Image (cartoon, helix red, strand yellow):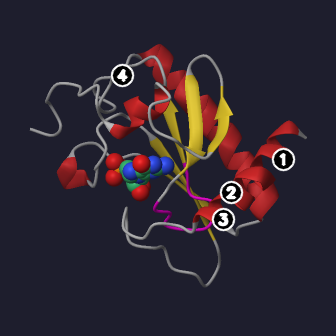
């Protein structure tokens, strides 16, 4: 039932939105929040989430919030490409556990892809906090520029 169940307000991304759990924040406006993935599949792996939609997946979310989410995802993809200079960038979004979803608050993954480097295993290896802090500082600086 992971595709069709009720929204759980205690999911980790809802806690991050409420400020009850920390994140390496990159961008925030009234509707959307972007932060670094704690278990990145590549250097710069970023998550973008809607703040005002209690939606588990693409089937639940209203079109207005979905548009806002995608606009910010595009902006963050550009910032990541400008700052990290990957040869590719993967944008992904999973719906339901069989599709790979593990956190049931809709989100988009932006995963820089570097030539000759494979992608890490999904949601598995926790990044070094110092590396995440340094990367956050670089990307926030780039976003301001
Ligand atoms: P999904 O599998 O639902 O598409 O993606 C969930 C993502 O959230 C995974 O890439 C996983 O590494 C990431 N993640 C899980 N828990 C946390 C957390 O507490 N903080 C952050 N920043 N990312 C998380």
Please tell me whether mark 4 sits on a helix, a strand or a loop: loop
Q: Is residue 6 visible?
A: yes
Q: CA distance from mark 2 to mark 3?
A: 5 Å
User: Which residue has dot 1 on it?
Assistant: 142
Kindly report the distance in space between the C-alpha atoms of the residues bearing marks 4 and 3.
35 Å
Q: Is residue 123 left or right of residue 1?
A: right
Q: Pinpoint residue 145: horizontal percent, then vertical percent.
A: 90, 41
Q: Residues within 10 Å of mark 3 (few under 14, many from 20)?
A: few
Instruction: Tell me where residue 12 sits by quadrant.
Output: top left
Other-residue count near label 4 (Cα within 10 Å), few / some / many at <14 / 14–19 / ≥20:
some
Disc 1, SS = helix
The residue at which mark 2 appears reads as: 133
Query: Can you tell which mark lies on residue 61?
Result: 4
Image coordinates of residue 16 in percent, x first then y, are 46, 34
Q: Residues within 10 Å of mark 2 (few under 14, many from 20)?
A: few
- Is residue 132 rendered magenta in the image? no
Q: Earlier in the sequence, mark 2 or mark 1?
A: 2
């Amino acid at each position: 039932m992971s595709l069709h169940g009720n929204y759980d307000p205690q999911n980790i991304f809802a806690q991050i939105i409420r400020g009850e759990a920390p994140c390496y924040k990159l961008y925030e406006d009234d509707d959307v929040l972007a932060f670094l993935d704690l278990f990145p599949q590549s250097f710069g792996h970023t998550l973008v989430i809607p703040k005002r939609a209690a939606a588990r997946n693409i089937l639940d979310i209203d079109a207005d919030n979905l548009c806002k989410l995608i606009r910010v995802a595009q902006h963050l993809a550009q910032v990541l490409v400008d700052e990290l200079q990957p040869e590719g960038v993967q944008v992904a979004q999973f719906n339901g556990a069989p599709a790979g979803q593990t956190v049931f608050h809709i989100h988009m993954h932006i995963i820089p892809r570097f030539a000759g480097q494979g992608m890490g295993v999904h949601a598995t290896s926790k990044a070094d906090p110092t590396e995440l802090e340094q990367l956050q500082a670089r990307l926030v600086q780039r976003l301001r520029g």
